[in-house]
Image (cartoon, rainbow, N blue to C red):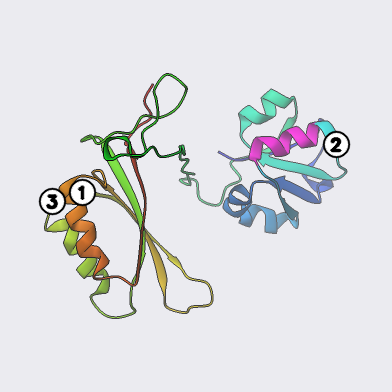
Amino acid sequence: EHCLIGYEHSSINSIRYVYSHPQALGQCRGFIQRHGFEPIPYYDTAGSVKMLKEKRPDASAAIASRLAAEIYGLSILAEGIEDNKNNYTRFLILAYPEKGEEGVRRVEEGEGRVANSISPNSKTSIIFTLEHRAGALYNVLREFASRGINLTMIVSRPIKDRPWEYNFYLDFEGHELDDRIKECLEGVKDKVVFLKVLGSYPKAILQ
């Protein structure tokens, strides 16, 4: 849940500028526009609250979580300001790959990092672009369905300055080094304009 965070005794009517991460600003666009605020992107939601606390810019507030307000001792001026109450932000942990098949995208455990060997608990993310023609997406998805590979997410995003063309982001169960996944991706490659494997990783963070 996003909150509008400001100084003690501040009112919403006194706010002109709102700082936050671009993702949070986008998720609260309706609230920002209704109040005539000027959105100012910042590197992090909690960081924008910290900046507000330390630099105290005039007529300013930040968008972040209730926890950020509590940590930095500022006041919540409004709660639940996101446009979509079911919105969520996905976070990924990135790590350097190691050489060798067994070590691909695997880092040592015990150093606060994520181990990622080939396992039945792996997921893989890819991005691809299709020709604008009937059945193009169906032909790609059939490569997964015919092999019994479970898809967990598919999202399309329009490509800037290229009308009617989209990038597709797709997550599925399995590791890119599994034989079945390799075979599937080879089939997908023949049916798309562009394909990039973003990586394989555990379904959940290892404790």
The range drawn in magenta is: 44-53
Residue 42 visible in the shown view:
yes
The residue drawn where x is 81% and y is 44% is 60
**Label 2: element kind:** loop
Marks 2 and 1: in contact by CB < 8 Å? no
In what quadrant of the picture does the N terminus appear? top right
The residue drawn where x is 48% and y is 70% is 159
Where residue 2 appears, x then y in whole percent?
A: 60, 40
Q: Amino acid at mark 2?
A: Arg
Based on the picture, tell me whether residue 51 belongs to the magenta stretch.
Answer: yes
Kindly identify which numbered label has been placed on residue 150: 1
- Could you say which quadrant of the image residue 43 lies in? top right
Kindly identify which numbered label has been placed on residue 56: 2
Q: Which residue corresponds to mark 3?
A: 148
Residue occupying the far top of the picture: 110
Please rate how many residues cluster around mark 3, counting C-alpha atoms within 10 Å: few if below 14, some from 14 to 19, many from 20: few
Where residue 12 appears, x then y in whole percent?
A: 77, 44
Marks 1 and 3: in contact by CB < 8 Å? yes
Kindly identify which numbered label has been placed on residue 115: none
